[in-house]
Image: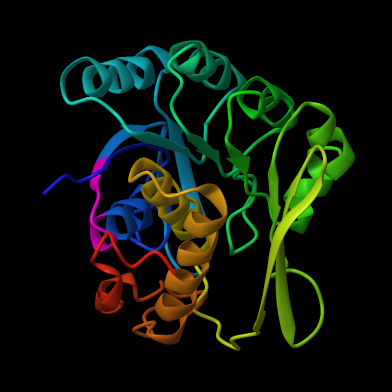
Amino acid sequence: MKSPRILIVAGSDSGGGAGIQADIKTVTMLGGHAMTAVTAITAQNTVGVQGVHPVPTEMVVRQMCSCLDDIGVDAVKLGMIGSAETARAVAEVLQGLRLPVVLDPVMVATSGSVLADAETIAAFGHLVALAAVVTPNLPELAALSGLDALNGRGATVLVKGGHAEGEVVTDRLIGPEGEIARWSNPRIHTSHTHGTGCTLASAIATGLGAGVDLPAAIGRAIAFVRASLERAPGLGQGHGPMGQQFATEFRSLDARG
């Protein structure tokens, strides 16, 4: 059985709630094969980030090339990049590969800890041009100069509505020519939201890697995130991890939602 090969370029989370750890759980539960290029090691738990150790850019590139040269890749998920230098190098590796890339512009952890400085945020522009879809939350969208700026670069953007007010969360897929699709769902009230953005982006990448079109991949990803939120195991004293491991109904690649 073919398993889509997903290369995840992101930072690790020692607490297992977000980052590489959430990405691997998500890709695995959705029937994909997860590969990783770790950009940073974090000392992190449900209440905050206690330390960040960036991985040298050269080593990030070596990890990516090791996967590309041997196993092959069907889609790429980009998360925490670590530095402006790494952002530029990652863009150079991906340039010309014609792979679907999902860019989750990670800037701040769920706990509020800053994970990207101004120079790194500015360097996201090198990656936006390569992405099939960019998945910012509302604060990240503002930091990237807004929807018009991203659409002006030719980007298709999934504007996530989780940070907006109200009992209904609306996510909108918007391309340079206007809105493509939208999804509205009742808000799930829980403090166990650590890793929602990572999970969503990795789920979208897995769908794209399996050959699903973008709106269908997003619809399936949103459904997976909601199921994972509803089944969070209740760990930690702060923003706890989600329950991806319990969303077993999504294991089939045919569950395209």
| Residue drawn at the location 49% of the way across and 77% of the way down | 226
Where residue 234 sits: x, y (%)? 38, 85
| Figure quadrant of the C terminus | bottom left
x%, y% of residue 192?
Answer: 49, 78
Q: Relative to 243, does residue 108 appear above or below in the rendering?
A: above
**Nearest the camera: 199 or 59?**
199
Q: Residue at x 42, y 49 (%)?
A: 212
Q: Is residue 120 magenta?
A: no
Q: Is residue 112 above or below residue 81?
A: below
Q: Residue at x 52, y 32 (%)?
A: 81
Tell me where residue 125 appears, x and y as whole percent.
Answer: 70, 24
Which residue is drawn at the image coordinates 49% and 48% (left, top)?
A: 213
Query: In the image, is residue 56 above or below residue 205?
Result: above
Q: Is residue 30 magenta?
A: yes
Residue 146 in view here: no
The segment highlighted magenta reads 28-34
Residue 73 appears in which quarter of the rendering?
top left
- Depth order, front residue of 115/192: 192
What is the basis of the colouring in this image? Answer: rainbow
Quarter of the image where one finds residue 183: bottom right
- Tell whether 118 sits left or right of 110: right
